[in-house]
Image: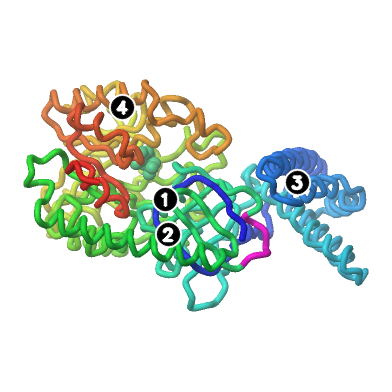
Amino acid sequence: MTELRGIAASGGIAIAGVLRIREQIKSGTFEGGPAESKKLYNELKILAHNEFGRLSSLSGDSNAAGMAELFDSYRMIIDDPGFEEAVLGRLDAGAALSDAIRQSGEELAASLVALEDDLISARSADVMGVSDELLRQLSILGMISDDPEEEFEESSESFIIVSKRLSPAQLMRIDKRRIEAICLSEGTVNDHTSILAGSMGIPCVVGLGPELLSEKYEKLVVDGNDGIVYLDPDDDTVRRYEEMKEKFLDLRNKAKLRLLERPLTECGRIMKVCCNISSPDDIDEDTSKYADGVGLFRTEYLYLKTNDYPTEEEQFEAYSAALKKMNGKDVIIRTCDIGFDKAVDYMKLPNEQNPGMGIRGIRISLERPEMFKTQLRALYRASVYGRLKIMFPMISSIWELREARRYCEEVKKELKAEGIKYGNVMLGIMIETPSSALLSSSFAKEADFFSIGSNDLTQYTIGADRINADISRYYDPHHPAVMELIAMTVRNAHDKGIHVGICGELASDIQMMGFFKEIGIDELSVAPSRLLEIKMNLLGEE
Ligand code: PEP
Ligand code: MG
């Protein structure tokens, strides 16, 4: 048994077999001429060298036997003259760079296997590891794209996903009912894969390091509460965690009884506690019963699980299902916030140097009115099934809100002309840029409500990328500047008499409850798996 410690990204305990997802990068489209391709190839070599160097030093820290040497040997393969000659030869013959790298890797790997020496042929996997890394670097540079169709092993069993990384789009394409937990060697708590796991109620541990990627184990115990993972757990560990799981369920049942006896709303209400979801499937019986509403429906996941824009009808089904399940409670549905770490090929977003600052959030909707209006039509049509509130993401200037509202008016007019009914829908904005927080007094005159997105507000206030694990100590959601902007937003919202919630990960940070009560925030919106715990905490009970 090996114990690995990572970062707890979504709570819960799982004991199951493993499904390994290896990064597959298929044929590329970069068609630069030989000279340009050779220049790019030299850049890729440096990037891959750096990456293996980084992994090698990480392995040294974590005592991962043999891993540091493995990454060092990968670096030697990058410089292998035979490999390089094969790539350059193919480029001279007119091959695309991605094809030249992949074919040269396959050729060298096959020639090692043909030597029929166990030790040497084992090196063929290392060669493929190197060519995959070079292709991955090419993909990061935006020169080729991942094939969206991942192939998952056929089996009816549920499993624990093990991978280096997992994009939100990949996660959305796996049958959620079969995923017991997610373990990643890289990743951060605030990236969208971790957040998605939380909204789906799937335990998740990230940043487990390269040892996780060893092929030598088949079963895992995952402790998503403390960020611990056991590879090939012994019987005692399995028993201990089975008992913990039972105890955890018992505690949840007690909390439910307690909340039924004395719901938060009836005991001198402190604040509403709602849930964040990414699909109507995330609303289970407990969520519709114990949550005070949906505080954030991240609709971009409807766009991520398909190979084309979701139709008005598909969206209408999803939004009306969420409203029906919540049975008259408020449901805040955010318009598509795609871009940055949530991207899909069919949208053909530009290859940006700095996607976190680029075409994401409301900007995509304003640039693609057809897409925006399709979503708004589906939302307004669904509004007759409950208490819908529409929210716009990443707003930073007043004109953006005005333009978004104009599209709402257009859509309402069209629906009216077609004789289609719609309800009375409030329009709010996310406060997730310093600009919107600083201007919250003006925004409060034109928006019907606010919800603070602390994940992005932290990223943009401090200027620290939320998905880069290497700078996680700089990404501090408790930073005084972030606290000040949150407090200022609440003051300005209340001055103008509008409701303000918080739906970023900070909303479920137990340490923050005192601060939230003090500033008088109206609503917390958290992953469904955290709902009971947060409500019990607000009631003053563990
Ligand atoms: C946020 O930024 O805090 C937020 C809730 O939005 P997302 O995490 O989806 O970017
Ligand atoms: Mg955000």
Which tag, 3 or 4, sits closer to the chain's start? 3
The numbered mark at residue 184 is: none
With 183 as the anchor, is 53 left or right in this view? right
Mark positioned earlier in the residue sequence (1 or 2)? 2
The residue that label 3 is drawn on is: 68
Quote the CA–CA distance across marks 2 and 4: 39 Å
Which is nearer the eye, 418 or 77?
A: 77
As measured in the structure, the alpha-carbon distance from the residue carrying label 1 to the one carrying label 2 is: 7 Å
* Dot in front, 2 or 4: 2
Q: Which residue is mark 1?
A: 225
Looking at the image, tell me whether mark 2 or mark 4 is earlier in sequence order: 2
What is the span of residues highlighted in magenta in the rendered image? 212-217
Cα distance between the residues tagged 1 and 4: 34 Å
Secondary structure of the residue carrying tag 2 is strand
Quote the CA–CA distance across marks 1 and 3: 29 Å
Label 3: which secondary element:
helix
As helix, strand or loop, the secondary structure at mark 4 comes to: helix
Q: Magenta region's main secondary structure? A: loop
Residue type at mark 4 is Ser
Taking the image as drawn, is residue 374 in sight? Answer: no
- Nearest to the eye among marks 2 and 3: give it: 2
Q: Nearer the viewer, residue 19 or 62?
A: 62
Label 3 crowd (10 A; few <14 / some 14-19 / many >=20): many
Q: Which residue is mark 4?
A: 436
Say the numbered circle drawn on residue 13.
Answer: 2
Q: Nearer the viewer, mark 1 or mark 3?
A: 1
Q: Residue 67: image x %, image y %?
A: 73, 50
Amino acid type assigned to the residue bearing label 3 in the image: Ala
